[in-house]
Image (tube, rainbow, N blue to C red):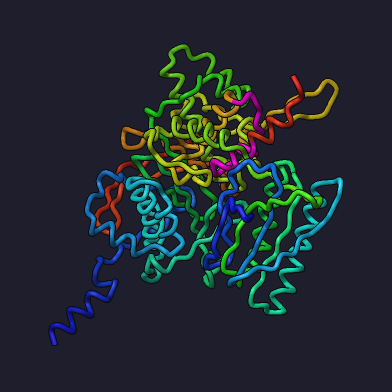
Amino acid sequence: MWDPIATCSEDRSGSAITNLGHNITEDFCLRLSSGNGAVSVSSALEQKDSSSVLVVALGLCTALISLLLMASLSTTSLSFKAPSIQSTTTRIYQVTLKRVLRKASSFQSISFGRFQSSKRLRLQISCAAKPETVQKVSDIVKEQLALSADTALTAESKFSALGADSLDTVEIVMALEEKFDISVEETDAQNITTIQEAADLIEDLVQKKPAA
Amino acid sequence: MRISVMSQMHRSFSIDLPSLIPLQLPSRRETHLWYVIPDEVKSTSLLKRYSQLLSPIEKDGVDQMRGDELKKNALLARTLVRTTIARYQTNKEVDPRSLMFKKNVYGKPEVDWQNCNNQPLHFNISHTDSLIACGVTVHVPVGIDVEDKERKIKHDVLAFAKRFYSADEVNVLATILDPEVQRKEFIKLWTLKEAYVKALGKGFSAAPFNTFTIQSMPGTEGAYNLCKTSEVTADPPEETKKCNGGWKFALFDLADSHYAAVCTEDDQANEGAPTKIIVRKTIPFVEDQLISERIFL
């Protein structure tokens, strides 16, 4: 019943999110568990505006976690499902979620997974850029920086760590513009530091393009 | 008895490495440019000692680099900055490990002088695969950029320029027929523009590349002017160009292999006065070599 799609364990700072690189279209939950056993608390919110639902849901989540921490329950698990949201708000989600997770630093593990339950109305989260986009960006980066074909790149790979300077970054952006037929603002171009950020920006721009 | 003295020596940092030779501060009209060639630093024990100079954050930064060569260059860059700045503290000997760094609001690295206020020293670094440079000035901000002369641009140079440079710069590049000469001019312009943005210290959004033109000063070699284009809302809309906007530029060859651009804020008291650039090659703790002293108008 519990199908984890990404897990992260608490690190020293209490917040670690692994890559949500899957294209999630089904309901999924956030479960925090410590020790054995689990008590599920699911939210049942129905709203039209997906981003405000997210904020409400996360607010609820934060409040619940704080309550749980204060109550010092020995086994605690919290589940909720969140709405399907545009990738542009995914980053807000990730930042907010990191803050939520920091508060949950007493938990041993945090995992994202799928609940096979379709009855209740749920919110859905779709995550960051598609793996194909990340792959295409990686290929372009490898070519621009003349990396060997078997260099292992992840979405988190930083351009600077791969030896890219500002001229390289600009060339990478130009190549991405050509590949995806988009136009990137100079300020956006200079703010890209990882493959994931490039992929997110691309998908954002592709989505915003007027229909041909 | 002897054994305990020896183990004391091993523990003490200051005996392991020779002292840094102090340096005279640059004068107001001077920029000091120091550079290291990574290929010339081969000793693993020397590199290990360099890594002892770095702060934990800097060490993390070095570790994050993918590949031994990139790690070594990152290490050399931080070592060059720390040792060079430490040497300019002529009042007392400064341990390069004790220097603290911070970033300004826009992310430009600066020395965090802590309790010693009003220190006049400014610095800026730039590196390529094969050369790491650090520029030092007093009282005025400095920006430097170095690029390998042979650096290949993967895109069409003119298309690249049209996308990112100003219209005037594109026109200058368009008149160059030889593609090699055109590529080299493109790179020179890139270093000058980068040096300006870095000297400004406000990030790229404060000075997008297509909002300013850098042009060579006629009758000089290596001296350049900055012209800022701004649109005056009038009917018909006009573009005004304001040149000589308070920044001095110098472009020159470095180590036969690189172009180096240095940009400093023009000292208001001496506006327009020539600037001197003193170039030295170094291997920290090992040797310095004076390369050139040159005046730019």
User: Percent position (x, y) of residue B113?
Assistant: 51, 66
User: Percent position (x, y) of residue B93?
Assistant: 36, 70
Q: Is residue A155 visible?
A: yes
Q: Quadrant of residue B90?
A: bottom left
Q: Nearer the viewer, residue A83 or B18?
A: A83
Q: Is residue A197 inside the magenta stretch? A: yes
User: Percent position (x, y) of residue B230?
Assistant: 72, 31
Q: Nearer the viewer, residue B57 or B224?
A: B57
Q: Is residue A19 inside the magenta stretch? A: no
Q: Quadrant of residue B92?
A: bottom left
Judged from this view, the residue extending furthest toward the left is B2
**Quadrant placement of the C terminus of chain A:** top right
Q: Is residue A7 left or right of residue A123?
A: left
Q: Is residue B206 visible?
A: no
Q: Is residue B276 left or right of residue A119?
A: left
User: Percent position (x, y) of residue B118?
Assistant: 55, 65
Number of marks in picture: 0
**Quadrant placement of the N terminus of chain A:** bottom right
Judged from this view, the residue extending furthest toward the top is B177
Residue in the picture at 45% in, 46% down? A161
B5 over B94 or under it: above or below: below
- Give the magenta-colored segment's residue range: A180-201
A124 over B16 or under it: above or below: above
Q: Nearer the viewer, residue A69 or B186?
A: A69
Judged from this view, the residue extending furthest toward the bottom is B1
Q: Quadrant of residue A26?
A: top right
